[in-house]
Image: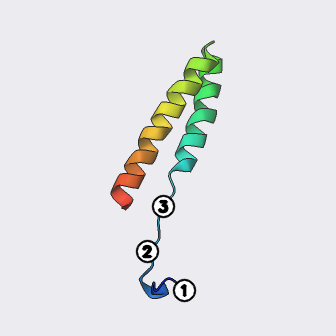
Amino acid sequence: MTNGQDPQKASDKNAGGFFMAAGCIVGAIVGGLLGQPSIGFLAGLGLGAAIAVAVWYFDR
C-alpha cells in the first residue's frame, strides 16, 4: 500500500446507512397505513438516523 498502512491491521467497519434507508421505507409504509405517510417517513428517518449514529459510535 502506498500510504504505509498494513493491510493485516485494517479493521472491518459496519455501515449504518441501511438503517436510515430501511427506516424511511418502513416509516412511509406504516405511516401510509395510518393515513400520515409524510410523518411516518420522517419518524422512520429519525429512528434510522439514531440507529446509524449508534452503530457509528460503537464501531469507532
Q: Residues within 10 Å of mark 3 (few under 14, many from 20)?
A: few
Residue visible at 47% across and 71% down in the picture: 12
Residue visible at 50% across and 51% down in the picture: 16
How many marks can you see?
3
Discs 2, 1 touching: Cβ within 8 Å? no
Discs 2, 3 touching: Cβ within 8 Å? no
SS of the residue under disc 2 = loop
Residue 38 image label = none
Q: Residues within 10 Å of mark 2 (few under 14, many from 20)?
A: few
Q: Nearer the viewer, mark 1 or mark 3?
A: 1
Q: Quadrant of residue 31?
A: top right
Real-space Cα separation, disc 1 to disc 3, in angstroms: 24 Å
Question: For the C terminus, which image quadrant?
Answer: bottom left
Discs 1, 3 touching: Cβ within 8 Å? no
Which callout, 1 or 3, points at the residue further toward the start of the chain?
Answer: 1
Residue visible at 45% across and 78% down in the picture: 10
Q: Nearer the viewer, residue 49 or 32?
A: 49
Residue 14 image label = 3
Real-space Cα separation, disc 2 to disc 3, in angstroms: 10 Å
Q: Residues within 10 Å of mark 1 (few under 14, many from 20)?
A: few
Residue visible at 41% across and 52% down in the picture: 55
The x, y position of residue 3, in whole percent, is 50, 82
Q: Nearer the viewer, mark 2 or mark 1?
A: 1
The x, y position of residue 21, in whole percent, is 60, 41
- Amino acid residing under circle 1: Thr
Would residue 4 appear left or right of 58 to someone viewing this image?
A: right
SS of the residue under disc 1 = loop
In the picture of the structure, the residue carrying the numbered disc 2 is: 11
In the picture of the structure, the residue carrying the numbered disc 1 is: 2
Q: Quadrant of residue 9?
A: bottom left
- Amino acid residing under circle 3: Asn
